[in-house]
Amino acid sequence: MFINDGDTVCVVGGGPGGSACAMTLLREARRLGRKINVVLLEHKHFVEHRHYNQCIGVLSPPFESVLKNELDLTLPENLVLNEIEGYRLHSDLLSLDLIGEESGRSVSVARSKFDAFMLEEAQKAGAQVVHNRMTSIEVNPDGVLVYSEGENIKSAVVVGAFGLDDGTCRIFEQGTPYRQPDFLNTVIARLYPGKEFMQSMGFIVHAFLLSHPGLEFGAITPKGDHISINIAGRRVSSSVMMEFLRSVPVQRFLPPHQRREKPLNYFKGRFPIAPASNLFGDRYVMIGDSAGLMRPFKGKGINTAINTGIYSARSIMRYGVSKKAFAENFYQDCRELTEDLPYGRVVRVLTNMATRFKFMDHMIAVAAERPDFMKAMFSSVSGHDPYKKIIMESASLPLAFTFAQKILGHFLLRQEAHLPVKSTSPAM
Ligand SMILES: Cc1cc2nc3c(=O)[nH]c(=O)nc-3n(C[C@H](O)[C@H](O)[C@H](O)COP(=O)(O)OP(=O)(O)OC[C@H]3O[C@@H](n4cnc5c(N)ncnc54)[C@H](O)[C@@H]3O)c2cc1C
């Protein structure tokens, strides 16, 4: 099963993954001297900025080198709302500036503008962008038929780049052995606190690991003239968002006149936390969020979508569209992500236990004392290093001993007092 001259490749979804895939397919075709058609189905109109993909819109390293080296693109500076200057981690009682170095800048962008830029570049590269919604799919041994609200597309292979769109996941589940990834729900709200408050806040991302039931993590991110607030958990909703906004650690980052205010708009979304099942097969392959190959917490989902889009396109053009070819090439290229998944899962379970048993304050206190644990915290929150590296570098006997002491002290104190533990260090 190979791609021949005149064949069509259909990409479903024009987020960063789909656009990067389309550009790479055409680039590879040129390099190999082949003529193919790339049809990209995207039902949203990003240029009008009415439609968007759920996101905070932070682009972090190595996004610039991937754009430059793999897609020959430079992010237009007018898309940058602000550069991110650092990360501050908050538990119930403590706050800590995370100190570490990233291998490039992190910037926040308006996500719809970034998606519009990528889609336009895919179109310039020669992809046919069709603004229709895919409605059904038939994957046969000799080709794929993709149905949409408009024209139908006969193609040699279909690339699933539809994110976690529930309806489209089901269409693929009916038409292929694909099963969508496990996910957390997310809610985003925005507040416009005014210029003065934004200036006083600085361009710091505030990450919150609080012992609030049902909440895995939350963050406040400055974005030019406003702050975006996001929460994630199995069952988060607008009321969990209100509880998060009213919690003591979060109130400090809201302007006084907006501390009791309800945000006008909430945006719901999803965040994959495990790989999809059967994420490739004969004549189909999933990339980005649809594939679920994401880090928990600081996901760098845009980078992952772009990278997996590039890997899938290379695999299709160089090695064909059979399940075997995807297993031996596309999936192998994803091993940096797949090999890190079990380590990410361990970090997620430990973090959830730490918040559940109100132990996160101690972890922050240890990070403030020990540079090795500070580095681990920085790399986890900024997403700088793979979890495997973080665990390997920070696992040491002295650190284990410090934690054993803290855990023992924590539970003895709780037993004695029958009360939640209170730290003496004030929140900053
Ligand atoms: C709350 C939240 C905050 C996040 N913040 C960040 C962040 O700051 N930085 C970061 O790197 N990542 C972040 N992410 C993750 C990031 O948004 C995703 O990982 C990334 O968008 C995945 O890209 P994608 O191309 O796979 O899918 P998407 O960006 O979801 O794109 C899928 C596209 O497919 C289209 N589509 C779906 N179904 C159909 C259909 N039937 N027909 C036609 N088109 C269809 C959709 O319209 C959409 O445009 C965040 C995620 C959430 C939920």
Image (tube, rainbow, N blue to C red):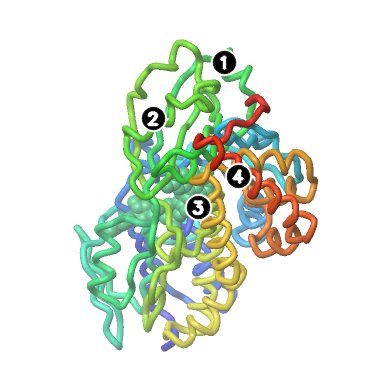
For marks 2 and 1, give the CA distance: 22 Å
Mark 4–mark 1 contact, CB under 8 Å? no
Numbered label attached to residue 412: 4
Judging depth in this view, the residue of 321 and 47 nearest the camera is 321
Of the two numbered discs 1 and 3 on the same chain, state the one appearing first in sequence: 3
Mark 2–mark 4 contact, CB under 8 Å? no
Mark 3–mark 4 contact, CB under 8 Å? no
Horizontal side of 369 relative to 361 (left or right) equals right
Residue receiving disc 2: 243
For marks 3 and 4, give the CA distance: 60 Å
For marks 1 and 3, give the CA distance: 36 Å
Residue receiving disc 1: 197
> Which secondary structure, mark 3?
helix
For marks 4 and 1, give the CA distance: 42 Å
* Neighbour tally class for label 1: few under 14, some 14-19, many 20 plus, Cα within 10 Å: some
Q: Say which residue appears at 47% left-offset and 84% top-offset.
A: 320
* Neighbour tally class for label 4: few under 14, some 14-19, many 20 plus, Cα within 10 Å: few
Mark 3–mark 2 contact, CB under 8 Å? no
Of the two numbered discs 2 and 4 on the same chain, state the one appearing first in sequence: 2
Judge whether 49 appears above or below 176 on screen: above
